[in-house]
Image (cartoon, rainbow, N blue to C red):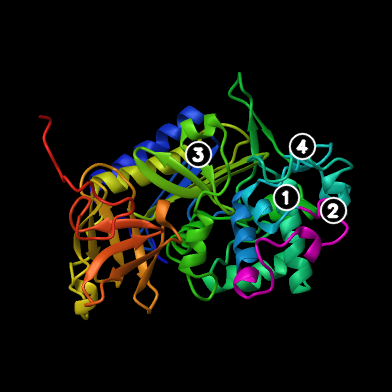
Amino acid sequence: MTTSQEELLPATRRALLHRIAVAQADGRAPSLVAAVVRDGRTVWHGARTSVDGHGPDETVQYRIGSITKTFTAVLVLRLRDEGLLDLGDPLEKHLPGTGAGEVTIRELLAHTSGLAAESPAPWWERTPGTLRPELADVLGEQPFRHPVGERFHYSNPGFTLLGAVVEEVRGEAWEDVLRREVLEPLGLRRTDVRPSAPQAGGWAVHPWADAMLPEPAEDLGRMAPAGQLWSTTGDLARFAAFLAKGDDRVLGAQSLREMRTPTAPSEAASVADGYAYGLGLEIRHHGGRLLAGHSGSLPGFLAGLQFSVEDDVAAVVLANCTSGPPVATVAAGLVGIVAEAEPRIPEPWRPLREADPAVLELAGPWYWGTHGFALRLTSDGLASLEPLTGNGRRSRFRPNGDGTWTGLEGYYAGEVLQAVRRADGSVDHLDLGSFAFTRQPYDDSAAVPGGVDPQGWRGIG
């Protein structure tokens, strides 16, 4: 994946540069580097630095903290897709004796396990991993803070357990599995558990003085699957393109859609902020668009990766300071700049390859009671049911090959849509999870649950 600075209009490139320049200056970051991806390719790279001379480019490594969790989640979903585990499996099935065996794989991925946010003292991010050689050292004597499955509570030890599951099922070290199954296939040659030159140094910036203190770069040991990785904007741009569209060598598009589907019950404040969590991916509403990705931090470093599937735009922002610029928000802002200044050009409209008369007769307006809906057949082989007005229930449906359709999203996800026919073969109504959709509001010629008043429609008099 090469970076072409000519891919974007000059005004867009200047707006992107201005955004990261403000972030670096206001956030007092020693350096900040960013990349933007569109249509699966890096189309812009920018950097700001406090050091005179050449700024960091897309090959300079920064520590990416909890973006590591998304890599670990990809490994776990691979195991699921191979049939080696189920997301509903209790941890005990694959990793016995941890003291947290009742927790499921899905709950660990979604941070609903009830486990503590951190490992026992001392602070794991700023001390050697050799202090926590075993899982028992990561979990401590009282690993739970909440009942299992009842609430979203971010847990670093939870992803340590997922890394251990990967090791147990594969029979080799987490980092070796990661390198072979994700990094090498995607060409992420500058992503690793340990840094290699050129890399940025991590700094703490004094909150009340323009002075800096170097941060230690600890090997996290057992906690590595939660936050160990070093990477570059170049590699993370490739990773963002993969997360948006999938790669069958690593993980298919359907499993990635599952990863970015909200699963965790959020607190009221999270709902107000437009934040949810899927399976190893954060989901945010920002500037009127839905973004997925992850943020990360370790002493000396901040990282943010955000992407919009609808706009086909992603952004990565890395900085080498313990606190400072809100990199996830900056990344979301970069996505917004490109999406708004240069909106995605849609693919040309194309007709259906085949128009089955038995299916085609189902297209058009239908009524659930007095609510109007339109059933449309699209060239991708799906059907969509949408309200004629307003923002009511809507879903796409995939054909099952037997004349029925299954809902893919929203209220009707997993529900079966089928045409109920009369003895002469004509369509009486559509049945959708017991809801009867008729051609007219409460059609007196169709089998409407509860029947239709024999006096029919009337006025007020």
Label 2: which secondary element: helix
- Residue indicated by mark 1: 158
Q: Amino acid at mark 2?
A: Leu
Crowd around label 2: few <14 · some 14–19 · many ≥20 (10 Å): some
Residue 450: where, in percent of width, then height?
A: 33, 50
Q: Residue at x 33, y 52 (%)?
A: 394
Residue 222: where, in percent of width, then height?
A: 80, 54
The magenta segment is 78-102
Q: Earlier in the sequence, mark 3 or mark 2?
A: 2
Mark 2 in CB contact with mark 4 (< 8 angstroms): no
Mark 4 in CB contact with mark 1 (< 8 angstroms): no
Label 4: which secondary element: loop
Q: How far apart are labels 1 and 2 at the CA level?
A: 11 Å
Q: How far apart are labels 2 and 4 at the CA level?
A: 17 Å
Q: Amino acid at mark 4?
A: Arg
From the viewer's perspective, is 358 left or right of 296?
Answer: left
- Residue indicated by mark 2: 135
Q: How far apart are labels 3 and 2 at the CA level?
A: 30 Å
From the viewer's perspective, is 377 left or right of 229?
Answer: left
- Residue indicated by mark 4: 145
Label 3: which secondary element: strand
- Residue indicated by mark 3: 275
- From the viewer's side, name the closer residue of 74 and 12: 74
Q: Earlier in the sequence, mark 3 or mark 1?
A: 1
Q: Amino acid at mark 3?
A: Tyr
Mark 1 in CB contact with mark 2 (< 8 angstroms): no
Q: Nearer the viewer, mark 2 or mark 4?
A: 4
